Image (tube, grey):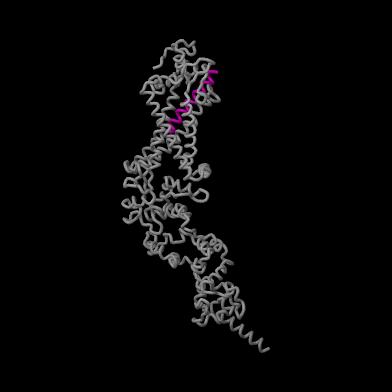
Amino acid sequence: MLKTRLFLLTALLAFTASRARAGIPAEQDDCLGCHGGDKSMTMDLPSGEKLPIYVDTAVFAKSVHGEMLRCADCHSDKNGYPHNSKPFKNRRDVTVAYYEQCKACHFANYTKTLDGVHFAVLAKGNQKAALCVDCHGSHDITRPTEPRARISATCAGCHQKESDVYVKSVHGKALAEQNQDVPVCTDCHRAHDIADPRDGKLSMRTPEVCGRCHTNEKLMAKYGLSTHVVDSYLSDFHGMSASLQRKTKGGPKGMVAAVCTDCHGVHDILSAKDPTSHTVKANLVQTCRKCHPGANENFPSAWLSHYQPSWNKASLVYGVQLFYKFLIPFILGSLAIQIVIHLWRVVVNR
Amino acid sequence: MNAPAQQHSEQIVRFSFSQRLEHIVTIFTFTGLCLTGLPQKFYAKGWAQWMVEHLGGIDQTRWIHRAIGILFVTATVVHLVNGLNALLSRRSAFTMLLNKKDFEDCVLQLRYYLGLTDEHPRYDRFDYKQKWEYWSLFLGNIIMGLSGLMLFFPTVFAKVLPGQLIPAAKVAHSNEGLMAFFVIAVWHIYNAHLQPDVFPFDTSIFTGKISRERMLHEHPLELARIEGRSADDDHGHHADASRKVG
């Protein structure tokens, strides 16, 4: 009898207490009774590392899951006391062991990660590969895009070298000035199904990746940039080659035709007007020589710099185009007329 | 002349073995170049991508195209050297050269087709249509060969010539190639296969022989010369026999 009354009292207290604290379902598990108190609470691992097992109630309450999830929703193996503990060797083991917990709710994004480079690296046994919590956090998960610049900062956590280059690029500098138009890492690399940039498939996709913004009339008008960069590229030798190489089964063999990033750079893209840019006229020979070792200073003018030939730009090319525009219909028309009148005469003669 | 007089069995030798061989080589190289070249021009089309895929990818397609191109250019050079040699050593009159009569023949032929006259031009070894096709092909070969080499070795050409010649060569190569394809597909196939006089198939360039009857009809002036008589002796095949070979 006494036991029952005591239990009811505790339950009532716990209930009112949780209502008072913004109703965190996690609290209802009473896990925070132990894990939410002592900030120095840790667990010793065989590796000698200490695993912090304190959870800041306020931080969790503010996280996207704060009003939604119970502790056991993610820590599904800890639904009783004492906990059935698993034999973790080190802290990374713990993270890897819990990594699939997100799958239950975020199945679509989880599936995407299976096509991603991080998963491929993990599958090969490299436990350093980024897992959900490495980018999103665990108890402190907030919307990853708020603010947008946070995304690039997140990737920089591991990819510092690339980040150092990116922040100096035309896109990176603008991002630092709170510009919301420029691409962050995930705009080109994607977030969950990140392609391995080393196998060439991502660079083959650059006309489409870069084209998403650089063919957007409204966006480009804001910066005075041409939206014809993609179609002028695709109609030129490099563009047609790359388009066909992309269609080749089993990927391209040998050298891949230049894509956007081969001339403009990857993380170090600068404005084409910047004197240190790879594509500014003074540096163009060097850029061409990356693929055409024998190129001299005449060679860069073989590339029409994304211009459509006209009387003012590339007049020779324009002239040849115009010549055939008239010659082909004239010749073929004359031949066709001759065939027709010949046949007509044959019919008349009969 | 490559055609010695042969009157027996009503068959006349019109083309020598080397001429027939040249034609066969041209058929195969030209077809090969079209098959590997046109899909590059129309790379955005589904059929082009299908063809490139079945040729082993764009890189392999290009190597095949270049290999056949080299053969094609070589054949053209051999033809040019042989032709010049024959012409300069005066072993033969170069029956393919254009002359005033070809233009007159052309006008007369068109007037005949239109029903403005009943007088049909009387042709020598090659009529103006054949000459036009020959010289078009010859000039086309030079354009295709030169522009093709520029596209094959762009950095080498840019060393001595303005860089803009490379994209200009690409435009020329692409358009000239397409035009050549259409001229052959429409005009040559019509004249050698579909036109009523030869339908369904003119075999003379393959067998080297042509019937005397066809010679009389299509090349009366040459036939007369072969048979060592004046063209006027033709018994009224066509009214006007006064025209002589230039």
Rendered view: A309 above or below B141 = below
| Quarter of the image with the C terminus of chain A in it | top right
Residue A79 appears in which quarter of the rendering? bottom right
Relative placement, left or right, of A105 versus A222 is right
Rendered view: A319 above or below A40 = above
Residue A4 appears in which quarter of the rendering? bottom right
Q: Residue at x 55, y 61 (%)?
A: A114
Residue A80: x and y in percent read: 62, 78
Q: Which residues are magenta?
A: A327-350
Rendered view: A120 above or below A228 = below
Rendered view: B220 above or below A336 = above
Residue A164 appears in which quarter of the rendering? bottom left
Q: Nearer the viewer, residue A68 or B163?
A: B163
The residue sitting at the bottom extreme is A2
Magenta stretch containing residue A330, yes or no? yes
Q: Nearer the viewer, residue A38 or B99?
A: B99
Relative placement, left or right, of A314 versus B42 is left
Q: Main secondary structure of the magenta part?
A: helix
